[in-house]
Amino acid sequence: MAQLKEIRTRIASIKNTRQVTSAMKMVSAAKLKKAQDTILHLAPYETKLQSIIQNLSLGDVHFDSVYFDEPAADNILVVVVGSNRGLCGAFNSNIYKTAMLHTLENYKYQLNKGQVKFFVIGHQVEKALLRKKVDIHGVSHHLLDSPSYENISKLAVELMDMFSWGVFNRIDIVYNKFKNAATQILSADQFLPVKKPDDVERALVLPDYIFEPSEDEILNKLVPDALKMKLYRIMLDSQAAEHGARMTAMHQATDNATKLMGELKQQYNNARQSAITNEILEITAGAEALKKN
């Protein structure tokens, strides 16, 4: 009977766990839908803004903008975007591994000289980086709790200021790009300096523009806006990827709990049947003993 009680306790515990994971799955699904809608509404504006800057850059126009300058990459900032909470599978561990691999592949020399710093968004990734004892320049975990354009644009301005003041001359962002609920694409994008079109692209398109106001005024307005929008899109992508990863992880956990409950119920039924059989055998043996007496 003690074994039956233990199995019943385990079944009740797993049932409670399944209820929690199922609820978390539904919450993540609702948040994912909201994040997807936001990305969908943002995409046309960001695409058009990037297209305008690209078309201007393809022309035979000289832009005097600090954001296009490409000095020697001897002070690197790697922005790593993860999550504040766990229970989302390998979401954060994959980001951490990608950030370290990206740094070792592209900035190994600077890393050995102590010229690579990290800016972390997400408690979970920060814990992993601290264990690696890397140089963390700053954190901004609150952005994940309120990822509004206003809050994210402030960080974008901070990054642009650090670049324009020469604190860092290369800023990369490592994050999970959202593809679907089950798939996240690990990405490492160059945030600053802004990449210029190559000579082949320039040769293919030679637009002729009349500028009003001047080219520099247009660029100095559009490029910061485009960088703010790019960071906002990255944060939304990462947020949607996190919800997708958590929804998938909780779906798998719910399925595993259901499977385990089935196995325990079978085990319980077998144990109960065995206990009843033993009781019948004991009663029969007792009855036989009484007959002999």
Image (cartoon, helix red, strand yellow):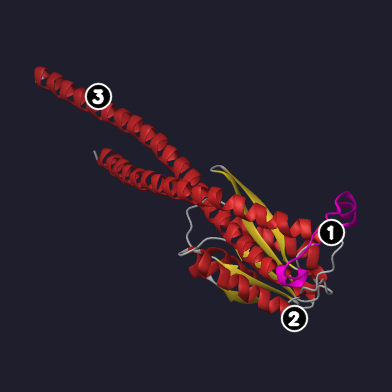
Q: Position of residue 225 (x, y in %)?
A: 63, 66
Q: Which residue is mark 2?
A: 166
Q: Is residue 233 visible?
A: yes
Q: Which of pointers 1 and 2 indicates the residue nearer the eye?
A: 1
Residue at image location 44% in from the left, 50% down from the top? 31
Alpha-carbon neighbours of circle 1 within 10 Å: few (<14), some, or many (≥20)? Answer: some
Q: CA distance from mark 1 to mark 2?
A: 28 Å
Q: Specify start and end residues of the magenta stretch as a single range.
A: 196-218
User: Where residue 277 is drawn, which disc sits there?
Assistant: 3
The verdict on residue 283 being magenta is no
The verdict on residue 204 being magenta is yes
Q: Which of pointers 1 and 3 indicates the residue nearer the eye?
A: 1
Closer-to-camera residue (48/184): 48
Which numbered disc, 2 or 3, marks the residue that appears first in the sequence?
2
Closer-to-camera residue (159/7): 159
Closer-to-camera residue (36/46): 46
In the depicted structure, whether residue 12 falls above or below residue 176: above
The amino acid type, in three-letter code, at marker 2 is: Gly
Q: CA distance from mark 1 to mark 3?
A: 89 Å
